[in-house]
Amino acid sequence: MLALTNTEHLSGVRISGDFWDFTELKQSLEEILLALPPATDGLNAVRSRIIDLCIQLQETLNGDFNIETTPNGISSQLQQDFKQPFPYDNIYFSTEVLWPELLFIVVSLDFFIKFAYEDESFQMLHLHIMTARKFLASIFKCVLMIVHNSEKHSIHNYYLHPRLNLKNYSLQYIDMLNAYYLSLNVTERKIQLPRILQRICQEDIDYVDFKERIEYLALQSQIPPHHVVLEFDYPEQIIW
């Protein structure tokens, strides 16, 4: 079963599971995205962030991130009772995702799930939607383990009643939040995590100003806004 836990320094969430857990989640996310029209106006850039997660899940299965082995209870004595040899350990994979990035994926994936329900063939997606919803619920469980009790009601409100338009969303804003969050210490991260979810869901004046800046740079360079590249101060190595 897929397991999600907060990383030691609250930099993000660690996703852990076996081959089938990762494969199921990856396939479910891909099927939900495939239910969207190929040229959904203004949503392709946002969809790419979930595609990036799918790529990361596949890379994890390829052994590019963390691999752990856990004894499964098979002993030499038990091995003699089997007609064919069994491994002594189970293999588990894990990978980490930054909190701001994951919170944006939560909001985006929830939107795409609701969008998929509008498709006539959405009934074929029931199992995939269940897998995705379980993934989202596990993420929120991790959020609630960090934030103060007084923040939990606000967290639910931000998520259930977002005031943002994902069409033509300035994804560079999420990159900026990733860099900002990594600059905080553990205590500050506990305080700022609900604020970051609010900033993603509410499209406040800071986001509006940021988006206008991106659009200006895009106009000056005569490129689409999502092609504008900004440099942020990321650490050379993330301490998860």
Image (spheres, rainbow, N blue to C red):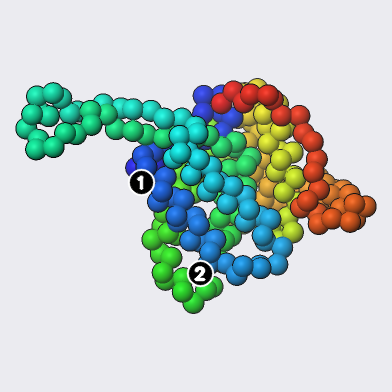
**10 Å neighbourhood of mark 2: few (<14), some, or many (≥20)?**
some
Q: Which residue is mark 1?
A: 20
| Element assignment for label 2 | loop
Residue 130 in picture, x, y percent from top left? 41, 57
204 to the left or right of 193:
right
- Residue 124 quadrant: bottom left
Residue drawn 74% across the image and 44% down it: 173
Image quarter hosting the C terminus: top right
Residue 184 figure quarter: top right
Regarding mark 1 in the picture, which secondary structure is present there? helix
Return the residue nearer the eye: 85 or 208: 85
Place of residue 95 in the rendered image (x, y in percent of width and height, measured from the top left): 49, 35
Q: Quadrant of the N terminus?
A: top left
Task: Indicate whether 119 appears above or below 73.
Answer: below
Q: Is residue 231 visible?
A: yes
* Residue 159 shows in the view: no
Q: In the rendering, at what x and y percent does residue 202 appear?
A: 70, 51
Residue farthest to the left?
Answer: 81
Discs 2/1, front:
1
Q: Is residue 221 left or right of residue 63?
A: right
Q: Specify the amino acid type for callout 1.
A: Trp
Which three-letter amino acid code belongs to the residue tagged 2? Tyr
Pick the front one: 88 or 43:
88
Residue placed under numbered mark 2 in the picture: 117
Q: In the current view of this chain or complex, which residue is farthest to the right? A: 220
